[in-house]
Amino acid sequence: MKNLSVFLMLLGSFAYQPVFSENIVDIKQAKNNKALSLKINGANSSRQKAFIKITNKTNQLIKLIISAGDMLITPTTSTQNLIITKTEEIQIQPHQSISKNLFALCAEKHDGCPGSETQYAPGKKATGNLLAMAEYLDENKLYDDDVAQNAIWCISDNAELSQIEHSNKTIERDLQTMIAKHQNLDLEKELAKIKAQKLMSSSFSNRRRITSFHGNISFNLEKDAKVNLVLLDPKGKTVATFIKEENFQAGIHKKDFAYTDANIEYGLYQLIILADGKEKLRRRVQLR
């Protein structure tokens, strides 16, 4: 009888033994989770603008959830914060380190783009229309599409609706509708204005050309670098070079530029700052 009692006690201990499952944390929780070591920097990729390194310091599997709409905040005031546009589930085995780029876009139009030296930390999740836009981009796999960055800026900085163009007209209309609602615009009236402006721009570009222009641009360097400032046409062709392999020290710079005898058509162009051959800043300019 005594042996039977011992057997039943042992059986009971096995029956109530807890079963450990994987630990699941989101990126905000991971910031202060002693089980994880987390480091986030900017990335030089044009689309995957964030780079993350995670180390699991425990004996258990940990799943890190990074969701569309999560914000990455930098203490560098001249550089843009980022918003995640693709949800990721990253499994980190015990004592494993994983590094990968994340799909993220800039969320402050008038600041500079991040570089690999820019440090980030998880911030509060986006809310309202900004969160809805990030989730829409994720759901429709637009996290690496040209229209995605402009759509985010239309919500975060009230950028112009005219920047929203997509080959899929359903997606284009969805984005325009979301932005018009956020900016309290009458969508049909705005689309009529955009159409009229395009017709006028097309008319000008067919018969008028720029012979000279000037301006200025501000940019921030986190380290000394050789800088190029170029102007690209809508097809991505370099039509003017304002700075060529010029040495700049780390810090904030404002550079005036001018060009004569350019002989280029009216239209929408892009100013690109390259630091040591890597894109640092991109600005759209309308020449007319």
Image: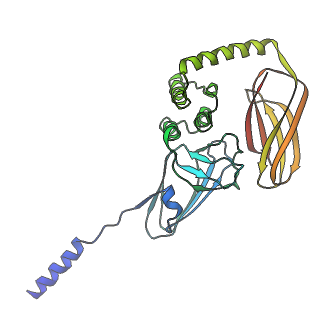
Q: Nearer the viewer, residue 63 or 148?
A: 148
In the displayed structure, 51 sits above or below 263; it is below
> Height in image: 174 above or below 195?
below
Residue at (20%, 79%) from the top-left corner?
10
Query: Residue at 61% of width from left, 45% of height from top?
Result: 48
- What colouring does the structure picture have? rainbow
Q: Quadrant of the C terminus?
A: top right
Q: Is 25 on the left or on the right of 279, as rendered? A: left
Number of numbered labels in the structure image: 0
Q: Tell me residue 135's x, y (percent).
A: 49, 40
Q: Residue furthest left?
A: 1
| Quarter of the view holding residue 267 | top right
Q: Give the vertical position of 281 relative to 9 (above or below).
A: above
Q: Residue furthest front?
A: 184
Q: How far across and how far down the image is residue 275, in percent?
A: 79, 47
* Residue closer to the observer: 85 or 181: 181
Which residue corresponds to the image point at 60% horizontal and 32% vertical from the top-left? 147
* Residue 44 point in image, percent of width and height: 69, 48
Q: Which residue lies at the image location 16% right of the left edge and 81% below the top edge?
A: 7
